[in-house]
Image (cartoon, grey):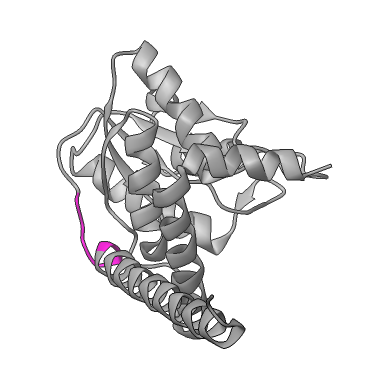
Amino acid sequence: MIGPRRVLRTALRVALVAAGLLAAYLLVTFVQVWRAARHDGARPSDAIVVLGAAQYDGRPSPVLAARLDHALDLYEEGIAPVIVVTGGRQEGDRFTEATAAATYLHEHGVPDDVILRETTGRSSWESLAAAARFLAARDLTRVVLVSDPYHAARIDAIASEVGLDATVSPTRTSPITGAAEWRRFAAETVRVAAGRVFGFGRLERGRDAAVP
């Protein structure tokens, strides 16, 4: 008969091994998130997809403006003939993130007929899934994603999950720097680690189900 002390020691060893494996997995994921943030994957594509961020009554926040400025640079370099702007409306807003982004790009010289709007997404997964659907209907699947550096690994993984042939070209002018950026790197590490295990779409559906 196995005594309770031996059972406790065995359980403790198992717990320590599991904790060590989890820590190693998170460390490897963090390094991958960090490396993705420093890689510019810009290449000739069908479309540039800009991930949404906050807007203030139709005016892009500094974070969103930095992403749009980078997308504008890529467009002017001839990386892609189409720009997709994404992001829905938060409660109480008059404008969607996509509408504010499209207006900004148009004011900076981008013709309105080459700007496509995804106006329903409340998260990166929702926006990319919706964008993938209407891009596929136009036979456009090769894209360059634009967002903040810390975001690169997760949106690349989500894009693959929703059927986009994507690379990421992060903006280098984001106002999110210092401690705030490192906090986002930590949060993205957890999200990427969980998404790889459970699936990003499944996590998104679970999040929606948890909201009353």
Q: Main secondary structure of the magenta part?
A: loop
Residue 15 on image: x %, y %: 49, 76
User: In the rendered image, is residue 103 in sight?
Assistant: no
Q: Quadrant of the C terminus?
A: top right
Q: In the orientation shown, which residue stands out farthest toward the front?
A: 1
**Residue 93 quadrant:** top right
The magenta segment is 36-41
- As displayed, is residue 16 above or below residue 62? below
Residue 182 on image: x %, y %: 45, 79
Residue at the image position 53 percent from the left and 29 percent from the top: 118
- As displayed, is residue 204 above or below residue 28? above
* Lateral position of residue 142 relative to residue 129, left or right: left
Q: Quadrant of the N terminus?
A: bottom right
- As displayed, is residue 162 above or below residue 68? above
**Residue 177 quadrant:** bottom left
Residue 117 on image: x %, y %: 51, 28
| Camera-nearest residue between 206 and 7 | 7
